[in-house]
Image: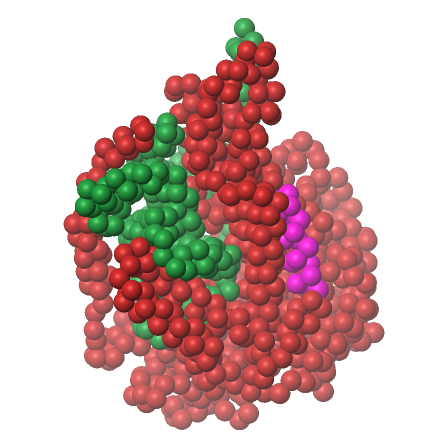
Chain colours: A green, B red
């Protein structure tokens, strides 16, 4: 009986919390699918269903091209990070080389550098190597992440040494130990950090805005910001754009979440 | 050891072959989009007007003109980069200063670039009759030290707009011949105020004072005050100007303008005037005429600004054109000049009729013959004035605008505020001129040393043949190359006097300037408040939500887990766009609801005492996403035996949670606190997009200040010094928390 009450209470709390945390996004959807005329009325009438905002949005600019660019960047960065981060994490976790900890701390210190500080020198660097206005300028600086290395290493540290020792007695190389023991065992955390990475890249705004110049090279966030018309605040159109930017991420999460949560569950039984 | 079962997860997904195939196709896609031509000119432009049949594309006109030009000049390809009004100027400045400018860019006379010797004068490229064809004022606007630095295109200006219907309904006559004195103006406004009585959020007049906005400056200059006087001295601290500020403040006291007028933006006032019609008078650029005729039809009139002296109080003018960047390839410059001349030719200026801006060439003819508003505007603008033509104006404007905002918000009293600006401006104006362009292209010796040391370490590591070390190298060297190398470059600047107009030697001055910069001090305070509130709130929310979800079963559990996580995948950009919409003073949901309930609307983003709390709320009310998942995973690791023994002792759920769950999750909590604090201390995008640091300086945060001082004021020394201070703070936070936790941070363990 008591348990039942507790459950009801937590259900209530969770639902209330959901209204607060998910509310803004629901509002985004409502606005995006509302009739623009009704929205512009005084007082505005919300919730009159219409696809007009999306029609206008899709007829303008290169939304498809921008989405492909965003997808390319996010996928390339995610794959590269999965490889480089897990390799480095393995090196830090299983390796016993000199300077291991100082190198690791150096990497940790990198987490504390606000990206905006290095923006100008990095911009000059990209310019010097002719990478401005290409997706490389967005991809390259992100192909390894100190935070990712840190997360994966923490996870790998919990893998018992005996396993790799046993494998090495059987004649496995360090790479094989990584490939057949550490990498597969770390898949849960790699999936988690992979999703984080993908989302972060998809959502990146300021840096692509500064380096990408041609319209066909824009990522989705940059492209959408060009649709903003300062004088005529067309919120319906803006929210439709925001929806288009957010929906693929939901799809990514839906697609990978099973894999990720499954991994988390397995990792948790240890 | 059920751990091993993890290895049976699908391995194929990430096999090396798939990965390399993906990369190759990526490479192909990236490079296949490049097409070569004999000459490719790069032109950047801002969004202009909507051509007939277009609903969002404001580049149709220039795209068409470019096609025409390409057809007439075979072998020339023109590449258009579409700027946005919001970040376009910054982008252009960054590109130009770093030597990556386009061939042609739009705008008013580019004084900064001219000083940096980046712009090619057009004098040699003028053709017969051009000089006579241009209105003298237009050429004068682009003239610096005897040379003309751009092709004038259109002339715009700021006008005072009146809603004729509201005036008529209140029984107030429009000013005769569009002119009125301050007293006539106040009386009219008071009459309208009486007419509006009882309507929340309705005001006779809307004002906004932002950087780069000159529309409302005439209100401050109504008693003859000037910002920069004829002898090039800052004079906004003169009695005449202070009288103007006091007058505007007295309008506030009379309820003619809203309390938070200093915090309103052009967008707010436009929405209130053009769309919601809650404001009867407001000043905007010429574009308003177009908007009020087409998108938001209204009976309106354009009139002069009120004046408190005998002299007229002129509105501010702006003359825009296209300018051409210098280039060693003279053929290229010649072609760029041709394109710029073509775009601004008399024939093409006739199209300005869609843009409601005035042509700058006589040969375009009188395109507004039958337009009463534009004809009235033309008369008003004849008496207009221009802003201080100096490359240091943006810096002065930055200081001036934020002090004016604060003076109008009652945060500072006018005279001392303006005196302080005068002092800072004096410094800005007294500085030597110099160029930083040559210097900036060279990376510093220090950064080079860092690079060489890293390279040596890399070689050593490779030679050492230690497999583990080699595996670490890619990640470490990428971080080194794209983070530490530029960081070294940036931090070195902290110890140099390095800004527009001055490239000096090594100094500690930047740090003194940082701590005496009121914006930076406000930024530090705000960032601290933000972190102290938002981080614990977020972590606590994640903990509570995770605990509640953890106790659930089956479908319910999956549902809540997904529902709480999903909003977290939306970007800060998207979320901030939504928050801006929710919090909008005029049409946002919050204020619409308040109005509906009959309550006074709140200046969520315009009231300096509230704006930062709005930023904080938007930081708190977001999905606990990642943190929640991490907590969930950690909870799964707590042995159930602990709960079972607690059950035996008869402990309730809350006691179990507090005495078992929470303490055992301490490692995870510390981890989330540290990463949360590191992220919170770097809060930036929200502020940039929600409030842009205003109203006044009320929502400045550290990274925002670092960003603006670098990319808006081009004071790289100051910016780097502030960045270094932030970096130190981040170090201290991390070390302190680690020390306090006194335990190895455990993740998922």
Whether B164 is drawn above or below B459: the answer is above
Q: Answer with left or right where residue A148 lies relative to residue B40.
A: right
Q: Position of residue B629 (x, y in %)?
A: 44, 34
Q: In which quadrant of the rendered view does residue B386 lie?
A: bottom right
Magenta portion: prevailing SS class: helix
Q: Residue drawn at (56%, 83%), measured in percent from left and top?
A: B503
- Viewer-nearest residue: B223 or B194: B223
Q: In which quadrant of the rendered view does residue B705 lie?
A: bottom right
Q: Is residue A207 magenta?
A: no
- Viewer-nearest residue: B686 or B312: B686
Picture quarter with the C terminus of chain B? top left
Q: Residue drawn at (32%, 89%), measured in percent from left and top?
A: B330
- Viewer-nearest residue: A95 or B560: A95
Q: Position of residue B504 (x, y in %)?
A: 58, 84
Q: Answer with left or right where residue B685 lies relative to residue B27.
A: right
Q: Position of residue A204 (x, y in %)?
A: 42, 53
In magenta, the rendered stretch is B518-535
Q: Residue drawn at (64%, 33%), measured in percent from left and top?
A: B596
Whether B702 is drawn above or below B745: the answer is below
Whether residue B125 is visible here, answered yes or no, is yes
- Viewer-nearest residue: B680 or B349: B680
């Amino acid at each position: 009986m008591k348990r039942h009450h507790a459950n009801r209470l937590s259900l209530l709390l969770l639902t209330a919390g959901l209204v607060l945390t998910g509310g803004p996004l629901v509002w985004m959807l409502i606005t995006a699918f509302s009739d623009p005329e009704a929205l512009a009325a005084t007082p505005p009438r919300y919730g009159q269903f219409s696809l007009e905002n999306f029609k206008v949005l899709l007829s303008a600019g290169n939304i498809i091209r921008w989405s492909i660019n965003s997808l390319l960047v996010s996928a390339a960065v995610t794959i590269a990070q999965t490889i480089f981060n897990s390799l480095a994490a393995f090196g830090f976790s299983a390796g016993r080389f000199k300077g291991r900890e100082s190198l690791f701390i150096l990497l940790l210190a990198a987490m504390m550098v606000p990206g905006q500080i290095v923006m100008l020198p990095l911009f000059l660097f990209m310019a010097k190597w002719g990478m401005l206005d290409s997706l490389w300028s967005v991809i390259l600086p992100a192909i390894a992440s100190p935070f990712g290395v840190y997360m994966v290493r923490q996870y790998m540290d919990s893998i018992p040494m005996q396993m790799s020792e046993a494998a090495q007695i059987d004649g496995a190389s360090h790479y094989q130990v990584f490939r057949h023991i550490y990498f597969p065992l770390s898949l849960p955390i790699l999936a988690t950090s992979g999703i984080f990475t993908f989302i972060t890249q998809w959502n990146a705004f300021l840096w692509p805005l500064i380096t990408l110049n041609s319209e066909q090279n824009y990522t989705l966030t940059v492209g959408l910001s060009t649709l903003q018309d300062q004088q005529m605040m067309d919120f319906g159109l803006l929210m439709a754009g925001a929806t288009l930017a957010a929906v693929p991420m939901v799809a990514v999460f839906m697609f990978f979440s099973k894999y990720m949560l499954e991994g988390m569950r397995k990792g948790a039984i240890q | 050891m059920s751990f091993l079962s993890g290895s049976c997860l699908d391995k194929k997904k990430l096999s090396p072959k798939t990965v390399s195939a993906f990369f190759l196709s990526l490479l192909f896609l990236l490079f296949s989009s490049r097409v070569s031509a004999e000459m490719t000119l790069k032109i950047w432009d801002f969004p202009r007007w909507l051509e007939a049949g277009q609903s969002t594309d404001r580049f149709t006109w220039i795209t068409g003109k470019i096609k025409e030009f390409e057809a007439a000049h075979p072998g020339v390809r023109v590449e258009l980069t579409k700027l946005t009004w919001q970040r376009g100027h910054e982008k252009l400045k960054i590109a130009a200063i770093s030597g990556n400018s386009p061939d042609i860019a739009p705008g008013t006379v580019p004084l900064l670039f001219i000083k940096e010797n980046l712009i090619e004068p057009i004098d040699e490229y003028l053709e017969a009759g051009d000089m006579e064809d241009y209105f003298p004022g237009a050429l004068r606007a682009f003239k610096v030290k005897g040379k003309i630095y751009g092709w004038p295109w259109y002339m715009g200006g700021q006008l005072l707009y009146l809603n004729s219907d509201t005036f008529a309904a209140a029984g107030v006559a429009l000013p005769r011949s569009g002119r009125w004195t301050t007293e006539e103006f106040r009386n009219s406004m008071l009459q309208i105020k009486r007419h509006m009585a009882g309507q929340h959020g309705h005001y006779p007049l809307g004002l906004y004072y932002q950087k780069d906005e000159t529309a409302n400056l005439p209100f401050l200059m109504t008693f003859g005050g000037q910002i920069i006087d004829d002898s090039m001295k800052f004079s906004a601290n003169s009695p005449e100007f202070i009288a103007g500020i006091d007058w505007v403040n007295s309008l506030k006291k009379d309820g003619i303008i809203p309390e938070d007028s200093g915090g309103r933006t052009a967008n707010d006032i436009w929405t209130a005037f053009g769309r919601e019609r809650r404001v009867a008078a407001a000043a905007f650029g010429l574009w308003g005429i177009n908007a009020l005729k087409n998108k938001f039809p209204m009976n309106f009139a354009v009139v002069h600004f009120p004046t408190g002296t005998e002299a007229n109080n002129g509105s501010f003018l702006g003359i825009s054109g296209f300018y051409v960047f210098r280039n060693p390839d003279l053929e290229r410059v010649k072609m760029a000049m041709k394109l710029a001349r073509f775009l601004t030719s008399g024939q093409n200026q006739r199209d300005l009729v869609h843009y409601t801006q005035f042509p700058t060439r006589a040969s375009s003819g009188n395109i507004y013959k039958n337009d009463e508003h534009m004809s009235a505007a033309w008369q008003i603008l004849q008496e207009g004035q221009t802003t201080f033509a100096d490359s240091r104006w943006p810096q002065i404007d930055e200081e001036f605008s934020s002090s004016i905002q604060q003076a109008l918000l009652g945060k500072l009293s006018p005279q001392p505020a303006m005196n302080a600006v005068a002092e800072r401006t004096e410094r800005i104006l007294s500085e030597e001129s110099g160029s930083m362009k040559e210097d900036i292209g060279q990376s510093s010796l220090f950064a080079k040393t860092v690079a060489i040391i890293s390279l040596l370490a890399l070689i050593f590591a490779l030679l050492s043949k230690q497999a583990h070390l080699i595996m670490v190298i890619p990640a470490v060297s990428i971080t080194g190359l794209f983070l530490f190398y530029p960081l070294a470059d940036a931090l070195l600047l902290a110890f140099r006097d390095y800004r527009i107009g001055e490239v000096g030697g090594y100094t500690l001055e930047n740090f003194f300037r940082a701590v005496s910069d009121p914006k930076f001090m406000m930024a530090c305070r705000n960032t601290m408040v933000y972190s102290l509130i938002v981080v614990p709130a977020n972590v606590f929310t994640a903990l509570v939500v995770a605990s509640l979800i953890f106790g659930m079963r089956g479908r319910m559990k999956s549902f809540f887990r997904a529902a709480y996580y999903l909003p977290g995948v939306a970007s800060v950009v998207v979320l901030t766009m939504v928050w801006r919409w929710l919090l909008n003073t005029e049409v946002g949901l919050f204020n619409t609801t308040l109005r509906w309930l009959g309550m006074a609307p709140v200046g969520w983003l315009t009231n300096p005492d509230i704006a930062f709390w709005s930023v904080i709320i938007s930081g708190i009310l977001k999905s606990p996403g990642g943190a929640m998942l991490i907590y969930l995973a950690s909870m799964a690791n707590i042995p159930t035996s602990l709960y079972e023994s607690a059950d035996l002792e008869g402990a309730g759920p809350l006691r179990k949670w507090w005495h078992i769950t929470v303490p055992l999750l301490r490692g995870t909590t510390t981890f989330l606190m540290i990463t949360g604090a590191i992220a919170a201390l770097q809060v930036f995008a929200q502020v940039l997009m929600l409030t842009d640091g205003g109203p006044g300086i009320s929502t400045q945060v550290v990274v925002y200040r670092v960003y603006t001082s670098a990319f808006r004021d081009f004071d790289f020394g100051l910016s780097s010094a502030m960045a270094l201070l932030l970096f130190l703070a981040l170090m201290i936070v991390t070390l302190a928390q680690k020390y306090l936790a006194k335990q190895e941070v455990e993740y998922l363990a």
